């Protein structure tokens, strides 16, 4: 009976040692997983911060582009108005030129008629 108790105790001691070894392995794995998890959380936080900075920069750039487009559209409108004014001025000048051309032609006819009268041709 004593031998059985000693044998049972040795088996229990071996089982306890195996369980302790297994628990130590699990604790080591748990420690490794926690460290990996913390590294991933840290990397995730850094990526989220980077994403926020990138989004803010993109929004700022988009706003800059919108302002530039607004300025260009204002310049285009201003140039259209200037072109319309220039076209009006050009038409007025062409009308004046046409009137002057008609008047010059009339004086030329008068001069030619006067020359014919004077020189008898």
Image (tube, rainbow, N blue to C red):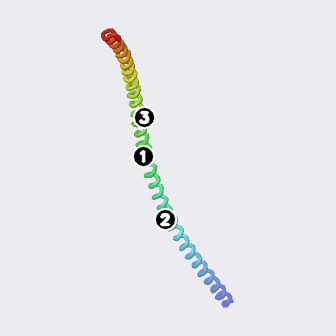
Q: Establish if 114 lies above or below 2.
A: above
Between discs 2 and 3, the one toward the N terminus: 2
Observer-nearest of 92 and 14: 92
Q: Residues within 10 Å of mark 2 (few under 14, many from 20)?
A: few
State left or right for residue 82 relative to residue 28: left
Identify residue for label 3: 73
Q: Residues within 10 Å of mark 1 (few under 14, many from 20)?
A: few
Identify residue for label 1: 61
The label on residue 39 is 2
Helix, strand, or loop for circle 3?
Answer: helix
Between discs 2 and 1, the one toward the N terminus: 2
Q: Establish if 10 lies above or below 79.
A: below
Observer-nearest of 70 and 5: 70
Q: Establish if 83 lies above or below 68.
A: above
Marks 2/3: CA–CA distance: 50 Å
Q: Establish if 79 lies above or below 102.
A: below
Residue at 59% x, 81% y is: 17
């Amino acid at each position: 009976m004593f031998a059985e108790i000693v044998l049972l105790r040795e088996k229990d001691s071996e089982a306890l040692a195996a369980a302790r070894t297994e628990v130590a392995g699990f604790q080591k794995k748990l420690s490794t997983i926690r460290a990996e998890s913390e590294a991933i959380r840290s990397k995730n936080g850094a990526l989220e911060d980077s994403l926020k900075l990138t989004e803010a920069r993109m929004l700022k750039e988009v706003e800059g582009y919108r302002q530039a487009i607004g300025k260009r559209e204002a310049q285009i409108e201003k140039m259209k108005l200037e072109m319309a004014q220039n076209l009006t001025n050009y038409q007025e000048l062409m009308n004046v030129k046409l009137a002057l051309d008609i008047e010059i032609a009339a004086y030329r006819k008068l001069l030619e008629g006067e020359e014919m009268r004077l020189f008898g041709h």
